[in-house]
Image (cartoon, grey):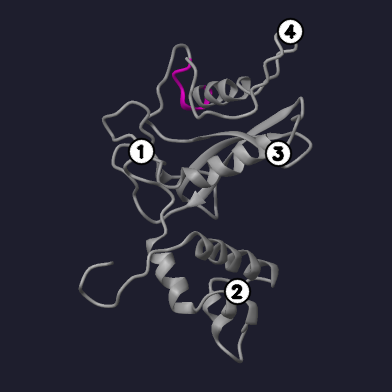
Amino acid sequence: MCGPYGHNFKIVKLQEMIHWDGILIWDAVKGGTNGRIHTRWVPGTLFDEPTSLAMNHSRFLQIKRVLKLNDNRDSPGRADEGYDPAYKFDLIYSTMVNNINTLTKYADLDVCMDETSYAVGGYGEANSGLIGKILGKPNCNRGGQICIAVDMHRFRPRAYVHRHKLHEKNLPFTGDGPNELRMILNKLELMVQDSSTGLDHTMLDGKVLA
């Protein structure tokens, strides 16, 4: 976008990203626009002066077009160890879980685990099993799922696993469900404080123990 054709594209600065994220949060605080956020810049509709002062609408759209949640140079390729077909959107969940585990000193002694579903009209990566038909979900019959462990008495996600077919499986956990449970328990184990040694694992490192 910085080439000789068309308008010059200004490199996005950190301050702009703070404003860009803030516009989304502020829109929700104001009640949300149900996908019509452009009306925050249109006088006579849902116009909002703080939004218009923070950034003009054309710049907001420019940043939206180039915003990415991953760096392909730092992500393992398909043939590399540790490859995850969900790497393009994993940062959302990784940030949320890591922040919660960092900001809270203790978790509940009991956790519950379930899967959350998201609707996608595309196909995802071939043969990865990341995107497919979802049975028993009337409002989301096609998309993906994420297994997540949450505190029993608070809505605090502690660990998660993207559901797909490329996870390494170790005997006797050959089924998808049992294997995902094993992976999440291994992640939770990294955060257990061992009173006998004084070790305190408070951060997830993204690794799956054998």
Residue to which mark 4 is pinned: 196
Mark 3: which amino acid?
Answer: Leu
Q: Residue at x 76, y 29 (%)?
A: 106
How packed mark 4 is, by other alpha carbons closer than 10 Å (few <14, some 14-19, many 20 or more), is few
How packed mark 3 is, by other alpha carbons closer than 10 Å (few <14, some 14-19, many 20 or more), is few
* Residue 27 belongs to the span the image colors magenta: no
For the residue pair 158 and 74, the one nearer the viewer reads as 74
What secondary structure is found at the residue carrying circle 1? Answer: loop
For the residue pair 29 and 52, the one nearer the viewer reads as 52
N-terminal of the pair, mark 4 or mark 1, is 1
Residue to which mark 2 is pinned: 33
Q: Residue at x 38, y 62 (%)?
A: 66
How packed mark 1 is, by other alpha carbons closer than 10 Å (few <14, some 14-19, many 20 or more), is some
Residue to which mark 1 is pinned: 75
Cα distance in 3D space between marks 4 and 1: 37 Å
What secondary structure is found at the residue carrying circle 3? Answer: helix
Residue to which mark 3 is pinned: 103
